[in-house]
Image (cartoon, helix red, strand yellow):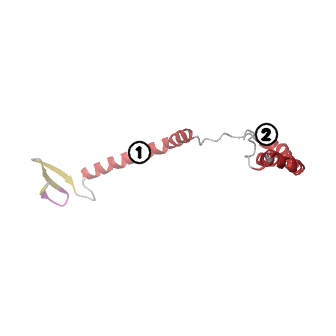
Amino acid sequence: MDIVFRDSNSIFFRTTGQLEWFKVGNLFEKEKLMCTHRKTIVRLLLVMLLCFSPVLVNAAAAADGLQKKQTSPVAMTLDLLLCRPLGMVATLTGGAVFVVSAPFSALGGNIGDAWDSLVVTPAQYTFSRPLGEFDK
């Protein structure tokens, strides 16, 4: 682009054999128009990203298996008030039964199995499982 003529209000450029006229200001009209289009495109892309991000997050979570099912409040209450105390009783009872059966289990060579069955399994059910989930 060659500047052909310039005065206080306008500039004439020669591009591809023809004269183009621009107003003088902070930005030339053509640049203003291009800048406006760029801003519009960027805004549109940001709006689309914000609109579709929940969809993308849900799709990714479903693909990864990260969706957690909601446990009902009734199940959580029953677990807290009924199953957890019974699990503690089962753990203590299993510990007492293990102490009584330990000599016999040692003779049979299955003391580890007796410990796991009588103490570890009730303790895991009572203390390791999430509240309200009974299948773990």
Q: Which amino acid lies under the numbered mark 1 shown in the image of this protein?
A: Leu
Which residue corresponds to mark 1? 45
Residue toward you, 115 or 124: 115
Please give the range of residues in magenta.
5-10
Task: Give how far across and how far down residue 21 sits, in percent.
Answer: 17, 51
Mark nearest the camera among 2 and 1 is 2
Task: Give how far across and how far down residue 39 sits, in percent.
Answer: 36, 49
> Helix, strand, or loop for circle 2?
helix
Residue sitting at the far left: 17
Queried whether the magenta region covers residue 132, the answer comes back as: no
Instruction: Say if residue 1 shows up in the picture.
Output: yes
Which disc number belongs to residue 84? none
In the rendered image, the vertical position of residue 43 relative to residue 9, given as above or below: above
Q: Which amino acid lies under the numbered mark 2 shown in the image of this protein?
A: Val
Residue toward you, 79 or 7: 79
Residue sitting at the far front: 107
Instruction: Give yes or no for contact between labels 2 and 1 (Cβ–Cβ under 8 Å).
Output: no
Residue toward you, 73 or 123: 123
Residue sitting at the far bottom: 8
Circle 1 packing at 10 Å, graded few (<14), some (14-19), many (20+), is few
- Looking at the rendered image, the quarter that the N terminus falls into is bottom left
Using residue 114 as the reference point, say whether residue 11 is left or right of it: left
Which disc number belongs to residue 74? 2
